[in-house]
Amino acid sequence: MANVYETSEFRNGLKVLVDGQPFSMIYFQFVKPGKGTAFTRTKLKNMLSGNVIERTYRTGDTLEAADCEDVEMQYTWNDGETFYFQNTETFDEVPVSKQMMDGSEDFLTDDIIVSITMFNSRPVAVTLPNFIEAKVTYAEPGAKGNTATNATKNATLSTGATIQVPLFVETDEVIRVDTRTREYVSRVNTK
């Protein structure tokens, strides 16, 4: 019998099957109304199409676990619309569409290791490392003394991404970036 999850086991990132399709749980909330039975509200993202659905499950309901496998792969190249990753163990090359990258392609660096979620031997999601280090190729000049706190400016990274950075960050510096939030984290000491 396949693994099943009860409502008490729901958590963000859980991969489940709904109507034969793989979904990732992006939100859940346990609700205990004054009258009636408790239930759990969920938002589920279809891993194949990217559509988000909302479903409500009563306490005791179950969902079947999606047979997904996370595989470490190395980014190799792209042709603009398709990104190619190589399995680090079998050396098989796997193509991933730009749509599936969902904007995270801005943080791909040469030979970066990512986690690709496979469903029925087909890639359905790409997860980058939480943090990357990248060189600032262009940073707007920052006006000193004009701000009280937390002022930011635009900076373009060597990966092509444009993010907000503090005023003290200059061109040619290496910085650490959170790929989940697209935010500056810190400078990287390159000495």
Image (tube, helix red, strand yellow):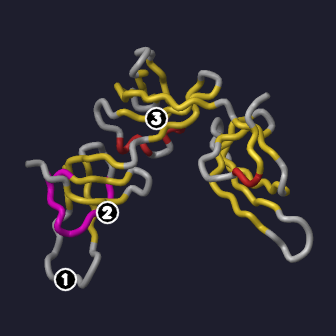
Q: Is residue 168 left or right of residue 129?
A: left
* Discs 1, 3 touching: Cβ within 8 Å: no
Where residue 18 sits, quadrant-wise, is: top right
Could you tell me which residue is drawn at 70 percent across and 54 percent down?
Answer: 43
Where residue 9 appears, as percent x and y from the top left, is 70, 50
The quadrant the N terminus occupies is top right
Q: Which residues are magenta?
A: 162-174
Image depth: mark 1 or mark 3 in front: 3
Point out the tag, 3 or 2, that comes first from the N-terminus.
3
- Local secondary structure at mark 1: loop
Per the model, the C-alpha gap separating discs 1 and 3 is 43 Å
Q: Is residue 127 above or below residue 59?
A: above
Q: Which residue is mark 3?
A: 115
Q: Which mark is residue 146?
A: 1
Q: Which residue is mark 2?
A: 164
Q: Is residue 41 left or right of residue 36?
A: left
Q: Is residue 162 above or below residue 159?
A: below
The amino acid beneath tag 3 is Ser
Where residue 119 sits, quadrant-wise, is: top right
Where residue 33 appears, as percent x and y from the top left, is 84, 73
Where residue 124 appears, as percent x and y from the top left, is 58, 33
The amino acid beneath tag 2 is Gln
In the image, 114 versus 48, the foreground residue is: 114
Q: Residues within 10 Å of mark 2 (few under 14, many from 20)?
A: some
* Discs 1, 2 touching: Cβ within 8 Å: no
Q: Is residue 191 above or below residue 165?
A: above
